[in-house]
Amino acid sequence: MRLLMSVFIFVFVGITATYSFHSVNAQEPVDALSDLVGAKAGQAENAIKDRGYTWVKTDKSGGSAYSYWRESGSNKCVTIRTADGRYQSIVYAPDFDCETVASTESASVSTTVEGKCRLYNEKSNRYRYEGSCEIEQDKSDGRSEYKITLGNGDFYHFVPQGAKYKVEMRQGWSSHLAAKTEMGNVATFEWYKWKLSADTGDAPETMDESSTGADDESANSAVRAGQGKFDATGKIPCAQAKGQPMGQCSFGVARDGGGTATVSVSLPDGRKRAIFFENGKPTGADLSQADGNMDFSYTKEADLYMIKAGNERYEIPEAVIYGG
């Protein structure tokens, strides 16, 4: 009896020690990638691959995307959490997190590829995003469902509903249905004032600066503002919360001309807010569910726009949009 108890204690302690060892390592920061925490997701992806990491899969939960990678040499599993278009954490994960279903049946039902995506305004053809993306197509149960993750972390989910598609975004479900057209390897979804085109054919895994227009002065204002390429900078009155007195926030503006522009405002807590103008009118901001309140409105007195974006308030002179 004593012998059996000794064996049991030895086995129990051994299992406990092994479990603790993996738990600690599963949350350990990845030193080789620690400098990329806080980097823009689309721009930093090449750096991850250049350092010997191989993409495995991407999962979505709430407002975050979790991408899983294998580390060369050690073959350890690494997970990167992306939110608000930036890498929030890069840590080692349990090995099973990097496992994928390898059955022939599953592979024929759902496929994920890297491609090239464009998100743009239907009326002005002004690009909100242009670059690399992950495109997952699920054909289970005779359906054709799409999950598209842009390089900046934004997520779009198209679910068949009759001849059209319901649209899920980071902000939640759209009240407008999308129509889908296909031409070759390009699937284009159109809903409300937006179009999202996903190209899976002959597209590079990621787009370099020359292919995204990073050095092209003709790139639209939203793209240039995201790259920090501004036509003017300065400060505007702003308030981040309800009832808060107006202070001063730094801004940069990228202009397309004719009253179409993107204003990027740096908030006191370090976040950035993009406010979009078309033909001299504020049309929206890059609000999400994480902001809580996603209402957008504005009034104009003389040459001053007074904007409410969620709980935030901004006063933007007309000269910021038109120049002069």
Image (spheres, grey):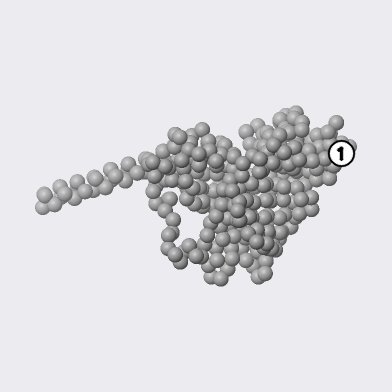
Q: Residue 142 at what x, y percent from top left? A: 56, 71
Q: Residue 159 at what x, y percent from top left? A: 61, 63
Q: Nearer the viewer, residue 269 or 283?
A: 283
Residue displayed at 36% across by 43% down? 23
Relative horizontal placement of residue 97, taking residue 230 as reference (left or right):
left
The residue singled out by tag 1 in the image is: 301
Residue displayed at 11% across by 49% down? 2
In this view, 161 is above or below 113: below
Could you tell me if residue 162 is visible in this image? yes
Residue displayed at 87% across by 36% down? 303
The residue lying furthest to the right in this view is 302
User: Residue 91: which quarter of the image?
Assistant: top left
Q: How many marks?
A: 1
Q: Nearer the viewer, residue 178 or 4?
A: 178
Relative horizontal placement of residue 89, taking residue 186 as reference (left or right):
left
Label 1 Cα neighbours within 10 Å, binned few <14 / some 14-19 / many ≥20? few
In this view, 87 is above or below 100: above
Q: Nearer the viewer, residue 212 or 239?
A: 212
User: Residue 184: which quarter of the image?
Assistant: bottom right
* Residue type at numbered disc 1: Glu
Relative horizontal placement of residue 268, taking residue 307 as reference (left or right):
left
Q: Residue 308 at what x, y percent from top left? A: 75, 42
In this view, 174 is above or below 83: below
Query: Please, what secondary structure does the residue beneath circle 1 have?
Result: strand
Where does the C terminus fall, quadrant-wise? top right
Q: Residue 178 at what x, y percent from top left? A: 69, 61
Residue displayed at 62% across by 33% down? 270
